Image (spheres, rainbow, N blue to C red):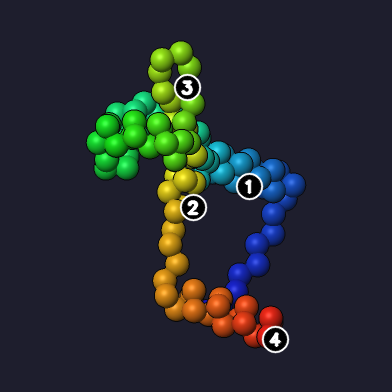
């Protein structure tokens, strides 16, 4: 593989910077961030979580799921729902056992 060295003029550098800026504005990462900050209805949350509406109402009643209430309507922020799902991750037995072993080594009698 050969290395190439390109010489750019100041106009070429400006053009390259503008093209990079355009590319970054169109990147999918920016679009996903904007999409996650969208309010969802209870039907949309039920579909997202693959649960029934009645189960979502139960989670709201128990204050188990993050929600916003305006009048009689419930709204759910997609980013909060995704964070809530991630926070519910359970650890496997080996990682729990490693934590127990670490704790016992640090706190010996």
Earlier residue among tags 4 and 2? 2
Residue highlighted by disc 3 = 69
Q: Quadrant of the C terminus?
A: bottom right
Between 22 and 105, the one nearer to me in the picture: 105
Earlier residue among tags 3 and 4? 3
Residue 87's disc number? 2
Residue 25's disc number? none
Count of numbered marks = 4
Separation of disc 3 and disc 2 at Cα? 22 Å
Separation of disc 1 and disc 3 at Cα? 48 Å
Q: Secondary structure at mark 3?
A: strand
Residue 56 image-quadrant placement: top left
Residue 46 image-quadrant placement: top left
Residue 41 image-quadrant placement: top left
Residue 88 drawn at (x, y percent) = 44, 53
Furthest toward the right, the residue is 10
Residue located at (63% from left, 47% from top): 16
Residue highlighted by disc 4 = 109
Residue located at (69% from left, 59% from top): 7
Earlier residue among tags 1 and 4? 1
Residue 48 drawn at (x, y percent) = 32, 40
Residue 16's disc number? 1
Residue located at (27% from left, 31% from top): 53
Q: Secondary structure at mark 1?
A: helix
Separation of disc 3 and disc 4 at Cα? 51 Å
């Amino acid at each position: 593989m050969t290395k190439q060295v390109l010489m750019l003029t100041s106009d070429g550098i400006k053009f390259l910077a503008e093209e990079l800026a355009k590319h970054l504005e169109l990147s999918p990462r920016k679009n996903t961030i904007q999409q996650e900050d969208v309010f969802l209805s209870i039907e949309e949350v039920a579909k997202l979580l693959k649960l029934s509406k009645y189960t979502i109402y139960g989670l709201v009643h128990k204050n188990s799921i993050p929600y916003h209430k305006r009048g009689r309507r419930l709204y759910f922020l997609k980013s909060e729902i995704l964070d809530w799902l991630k926070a519910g991750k359970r650890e496997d037995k080996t990682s729990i056992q490693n934590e127990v072993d670490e704790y016992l080594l640090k706190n010996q009698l």
